[in-house]
Image (cartoon, rainbow, N blue to C red):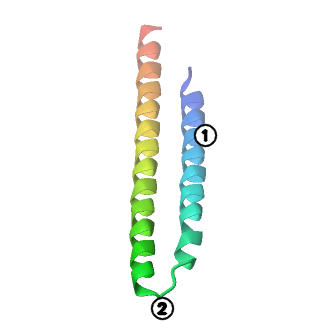
Amino acid sequence: MDGCNIFDQFFNQFSEFQKTFFNTWGMMMPNMQNINLMNSPENVEKTVKLQEEFIKNSLELQEQFTRLTIDTQRKIWNSYFQMLRR
């Protein structure tokens, strides 16, 4: 693997991360429009569900980003050591 290939893979993975982020964010947005302020007990339940969903999606996003970061670092270091061995 050469340096250009590593950066190409990194940017491809970063692009996938962005797509996942915006898809996750887009899935949360329709739920925000469904909250009815007139019905208080129902509103509280919807708000709690929305918060729970938001946290769940945020954690999933963080998990994916962390995996992407670790995979990228692993590839960079593997490439570095391969170049040293040549």
Can you tell which quarter of the image residue 81 is in?
A: top left
Is residue 52 shown above or below 5? below
Looking at the image, which is closer to me, 56 or 39?
Answer: 39
Say whether residue 69 is left or right of residue 28.
left
Q: Is residue 15 left or right of residue 65?
A: right
For label 2, the SS is loop
**Of the residues shown, which amino acid type is indicated by label 2?**
Met
Q: Quadrant of the N terminus?
A: top right
Type of amino acid under label 1: Asn
Above or below, 37 relative to 69:
below
The mark lying in front, picked from 1 and 2, is 2
Left or right of 27? Residue 79 is left
Q: Position of residue 33 (x, y in %)?
A: 57, 78
Which residue is nearer to you in this view: 35 or 17? Answer: 35
Tell me the number on the disc at residue 38.
2
| Residue closest to the far bottom | 38
Label 2: how many residues lie within 10 Å, few (<14), some (14-19) or many (20+)?
few
